[in-house]
Amino acid sequence: MKAFARQHPLAIYFVLTYFFSWSVFIPLALLKHGVIQLTVPFSLYYLASFGPLLAALITTGLIGGSEALRELLGRMLRWRLRPVWWAAALSPILLLAVTVIILQVIRGEWFDLNSVGQVEYLPDLGVGAFFLWLMTYGIGEETGWRGFALPRFQKNLSALRATLLLWIFIAIWHAPAFFLVYDPAILPGFLPGLLAGAIVFT
């Protein structure tokens, strides 16, 4: 298994990612549409976001052992960066602040930040929703997508081609969510938005 993982790390990674995440997504989607009967909370949906993280940790451990795992986790804890990267990391929060101010000027009323805490299948989290997004979309997904898969794609491909290929895998990974939380009507905007985000992250 270790020899195969070293020769085909991305294959192992994506199989494990889909297996872990879809093991959560698909039963919940079937439950929502009445195909199966289970007594489980739909809030389990958020566990699917940890599929890429688990797959990255397992595959990294298989191909490089504890030293490779320390390197991967070490990159997640690297705080001493040039200011330009901190500005990039904090730019979504700054953009939100600017947007709130612009909306206040246009509408004459402040944006209700409490609405940010309203998430699918969970009680109102308030600003705690930011912690949820950090743990799921941030650590849960990005450790795999950008921490494990992207650097390996870029060994043989240009940054753009690697990003396009990763975008396809991420889009397919989201497919079951369209039977669970996403409205299929958003698909024409979802795919270009996902690609734009992938390019920015790369």
Image: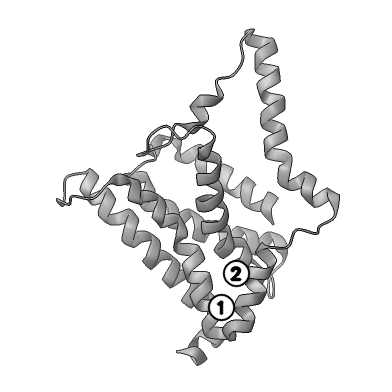
Where's residue 157, x and y in %?
Answer: 68, 70
Q: Is residue 23 above or below residue 197?
A: below
What crowding class fits label 2: few (fewer than 14 Cα within 10 Å), some (14-19), or many (20 or more)? Answer: many
Q: Residue at x 66, y 63 (%)?
A: 76
Q: Nearer the viewer, residue 43 or 25?
A: 43
User: In the drawing, what numbered circle is on residue 190?
Assistant: none
Q: Nearer the viewer, residue 149 or 64?
A: 64
| Local secondary structure at mark 2 | helix
Is disc 1 surrounded by few (<14), some (14 to 19) or many (20+) residues within 10 Å?
Answer: many
For label 1, the residue is 60
Q: How many marks?
A: 2
Instruction: State the residue at coordinates (53%, 52%).
Output: 135
Residue 137 sits above or below residue 57 on the image: above
- Can residue 160 be seen in this snapshot? yes
Q: Residue at x 45, y 55 (%)?
A: 49
For the residues labelled 1 and 2, say whether their Cβ atoms are less than 8 Å apart. yes
x, y percent for residue 147: 62, 65
Disc 2: which residue: 148
Image x and y of residue 70, in percent: 64, 76
Residue type, label 1: Thr
- What amino acid type is highlighted by mark number 2? Phe
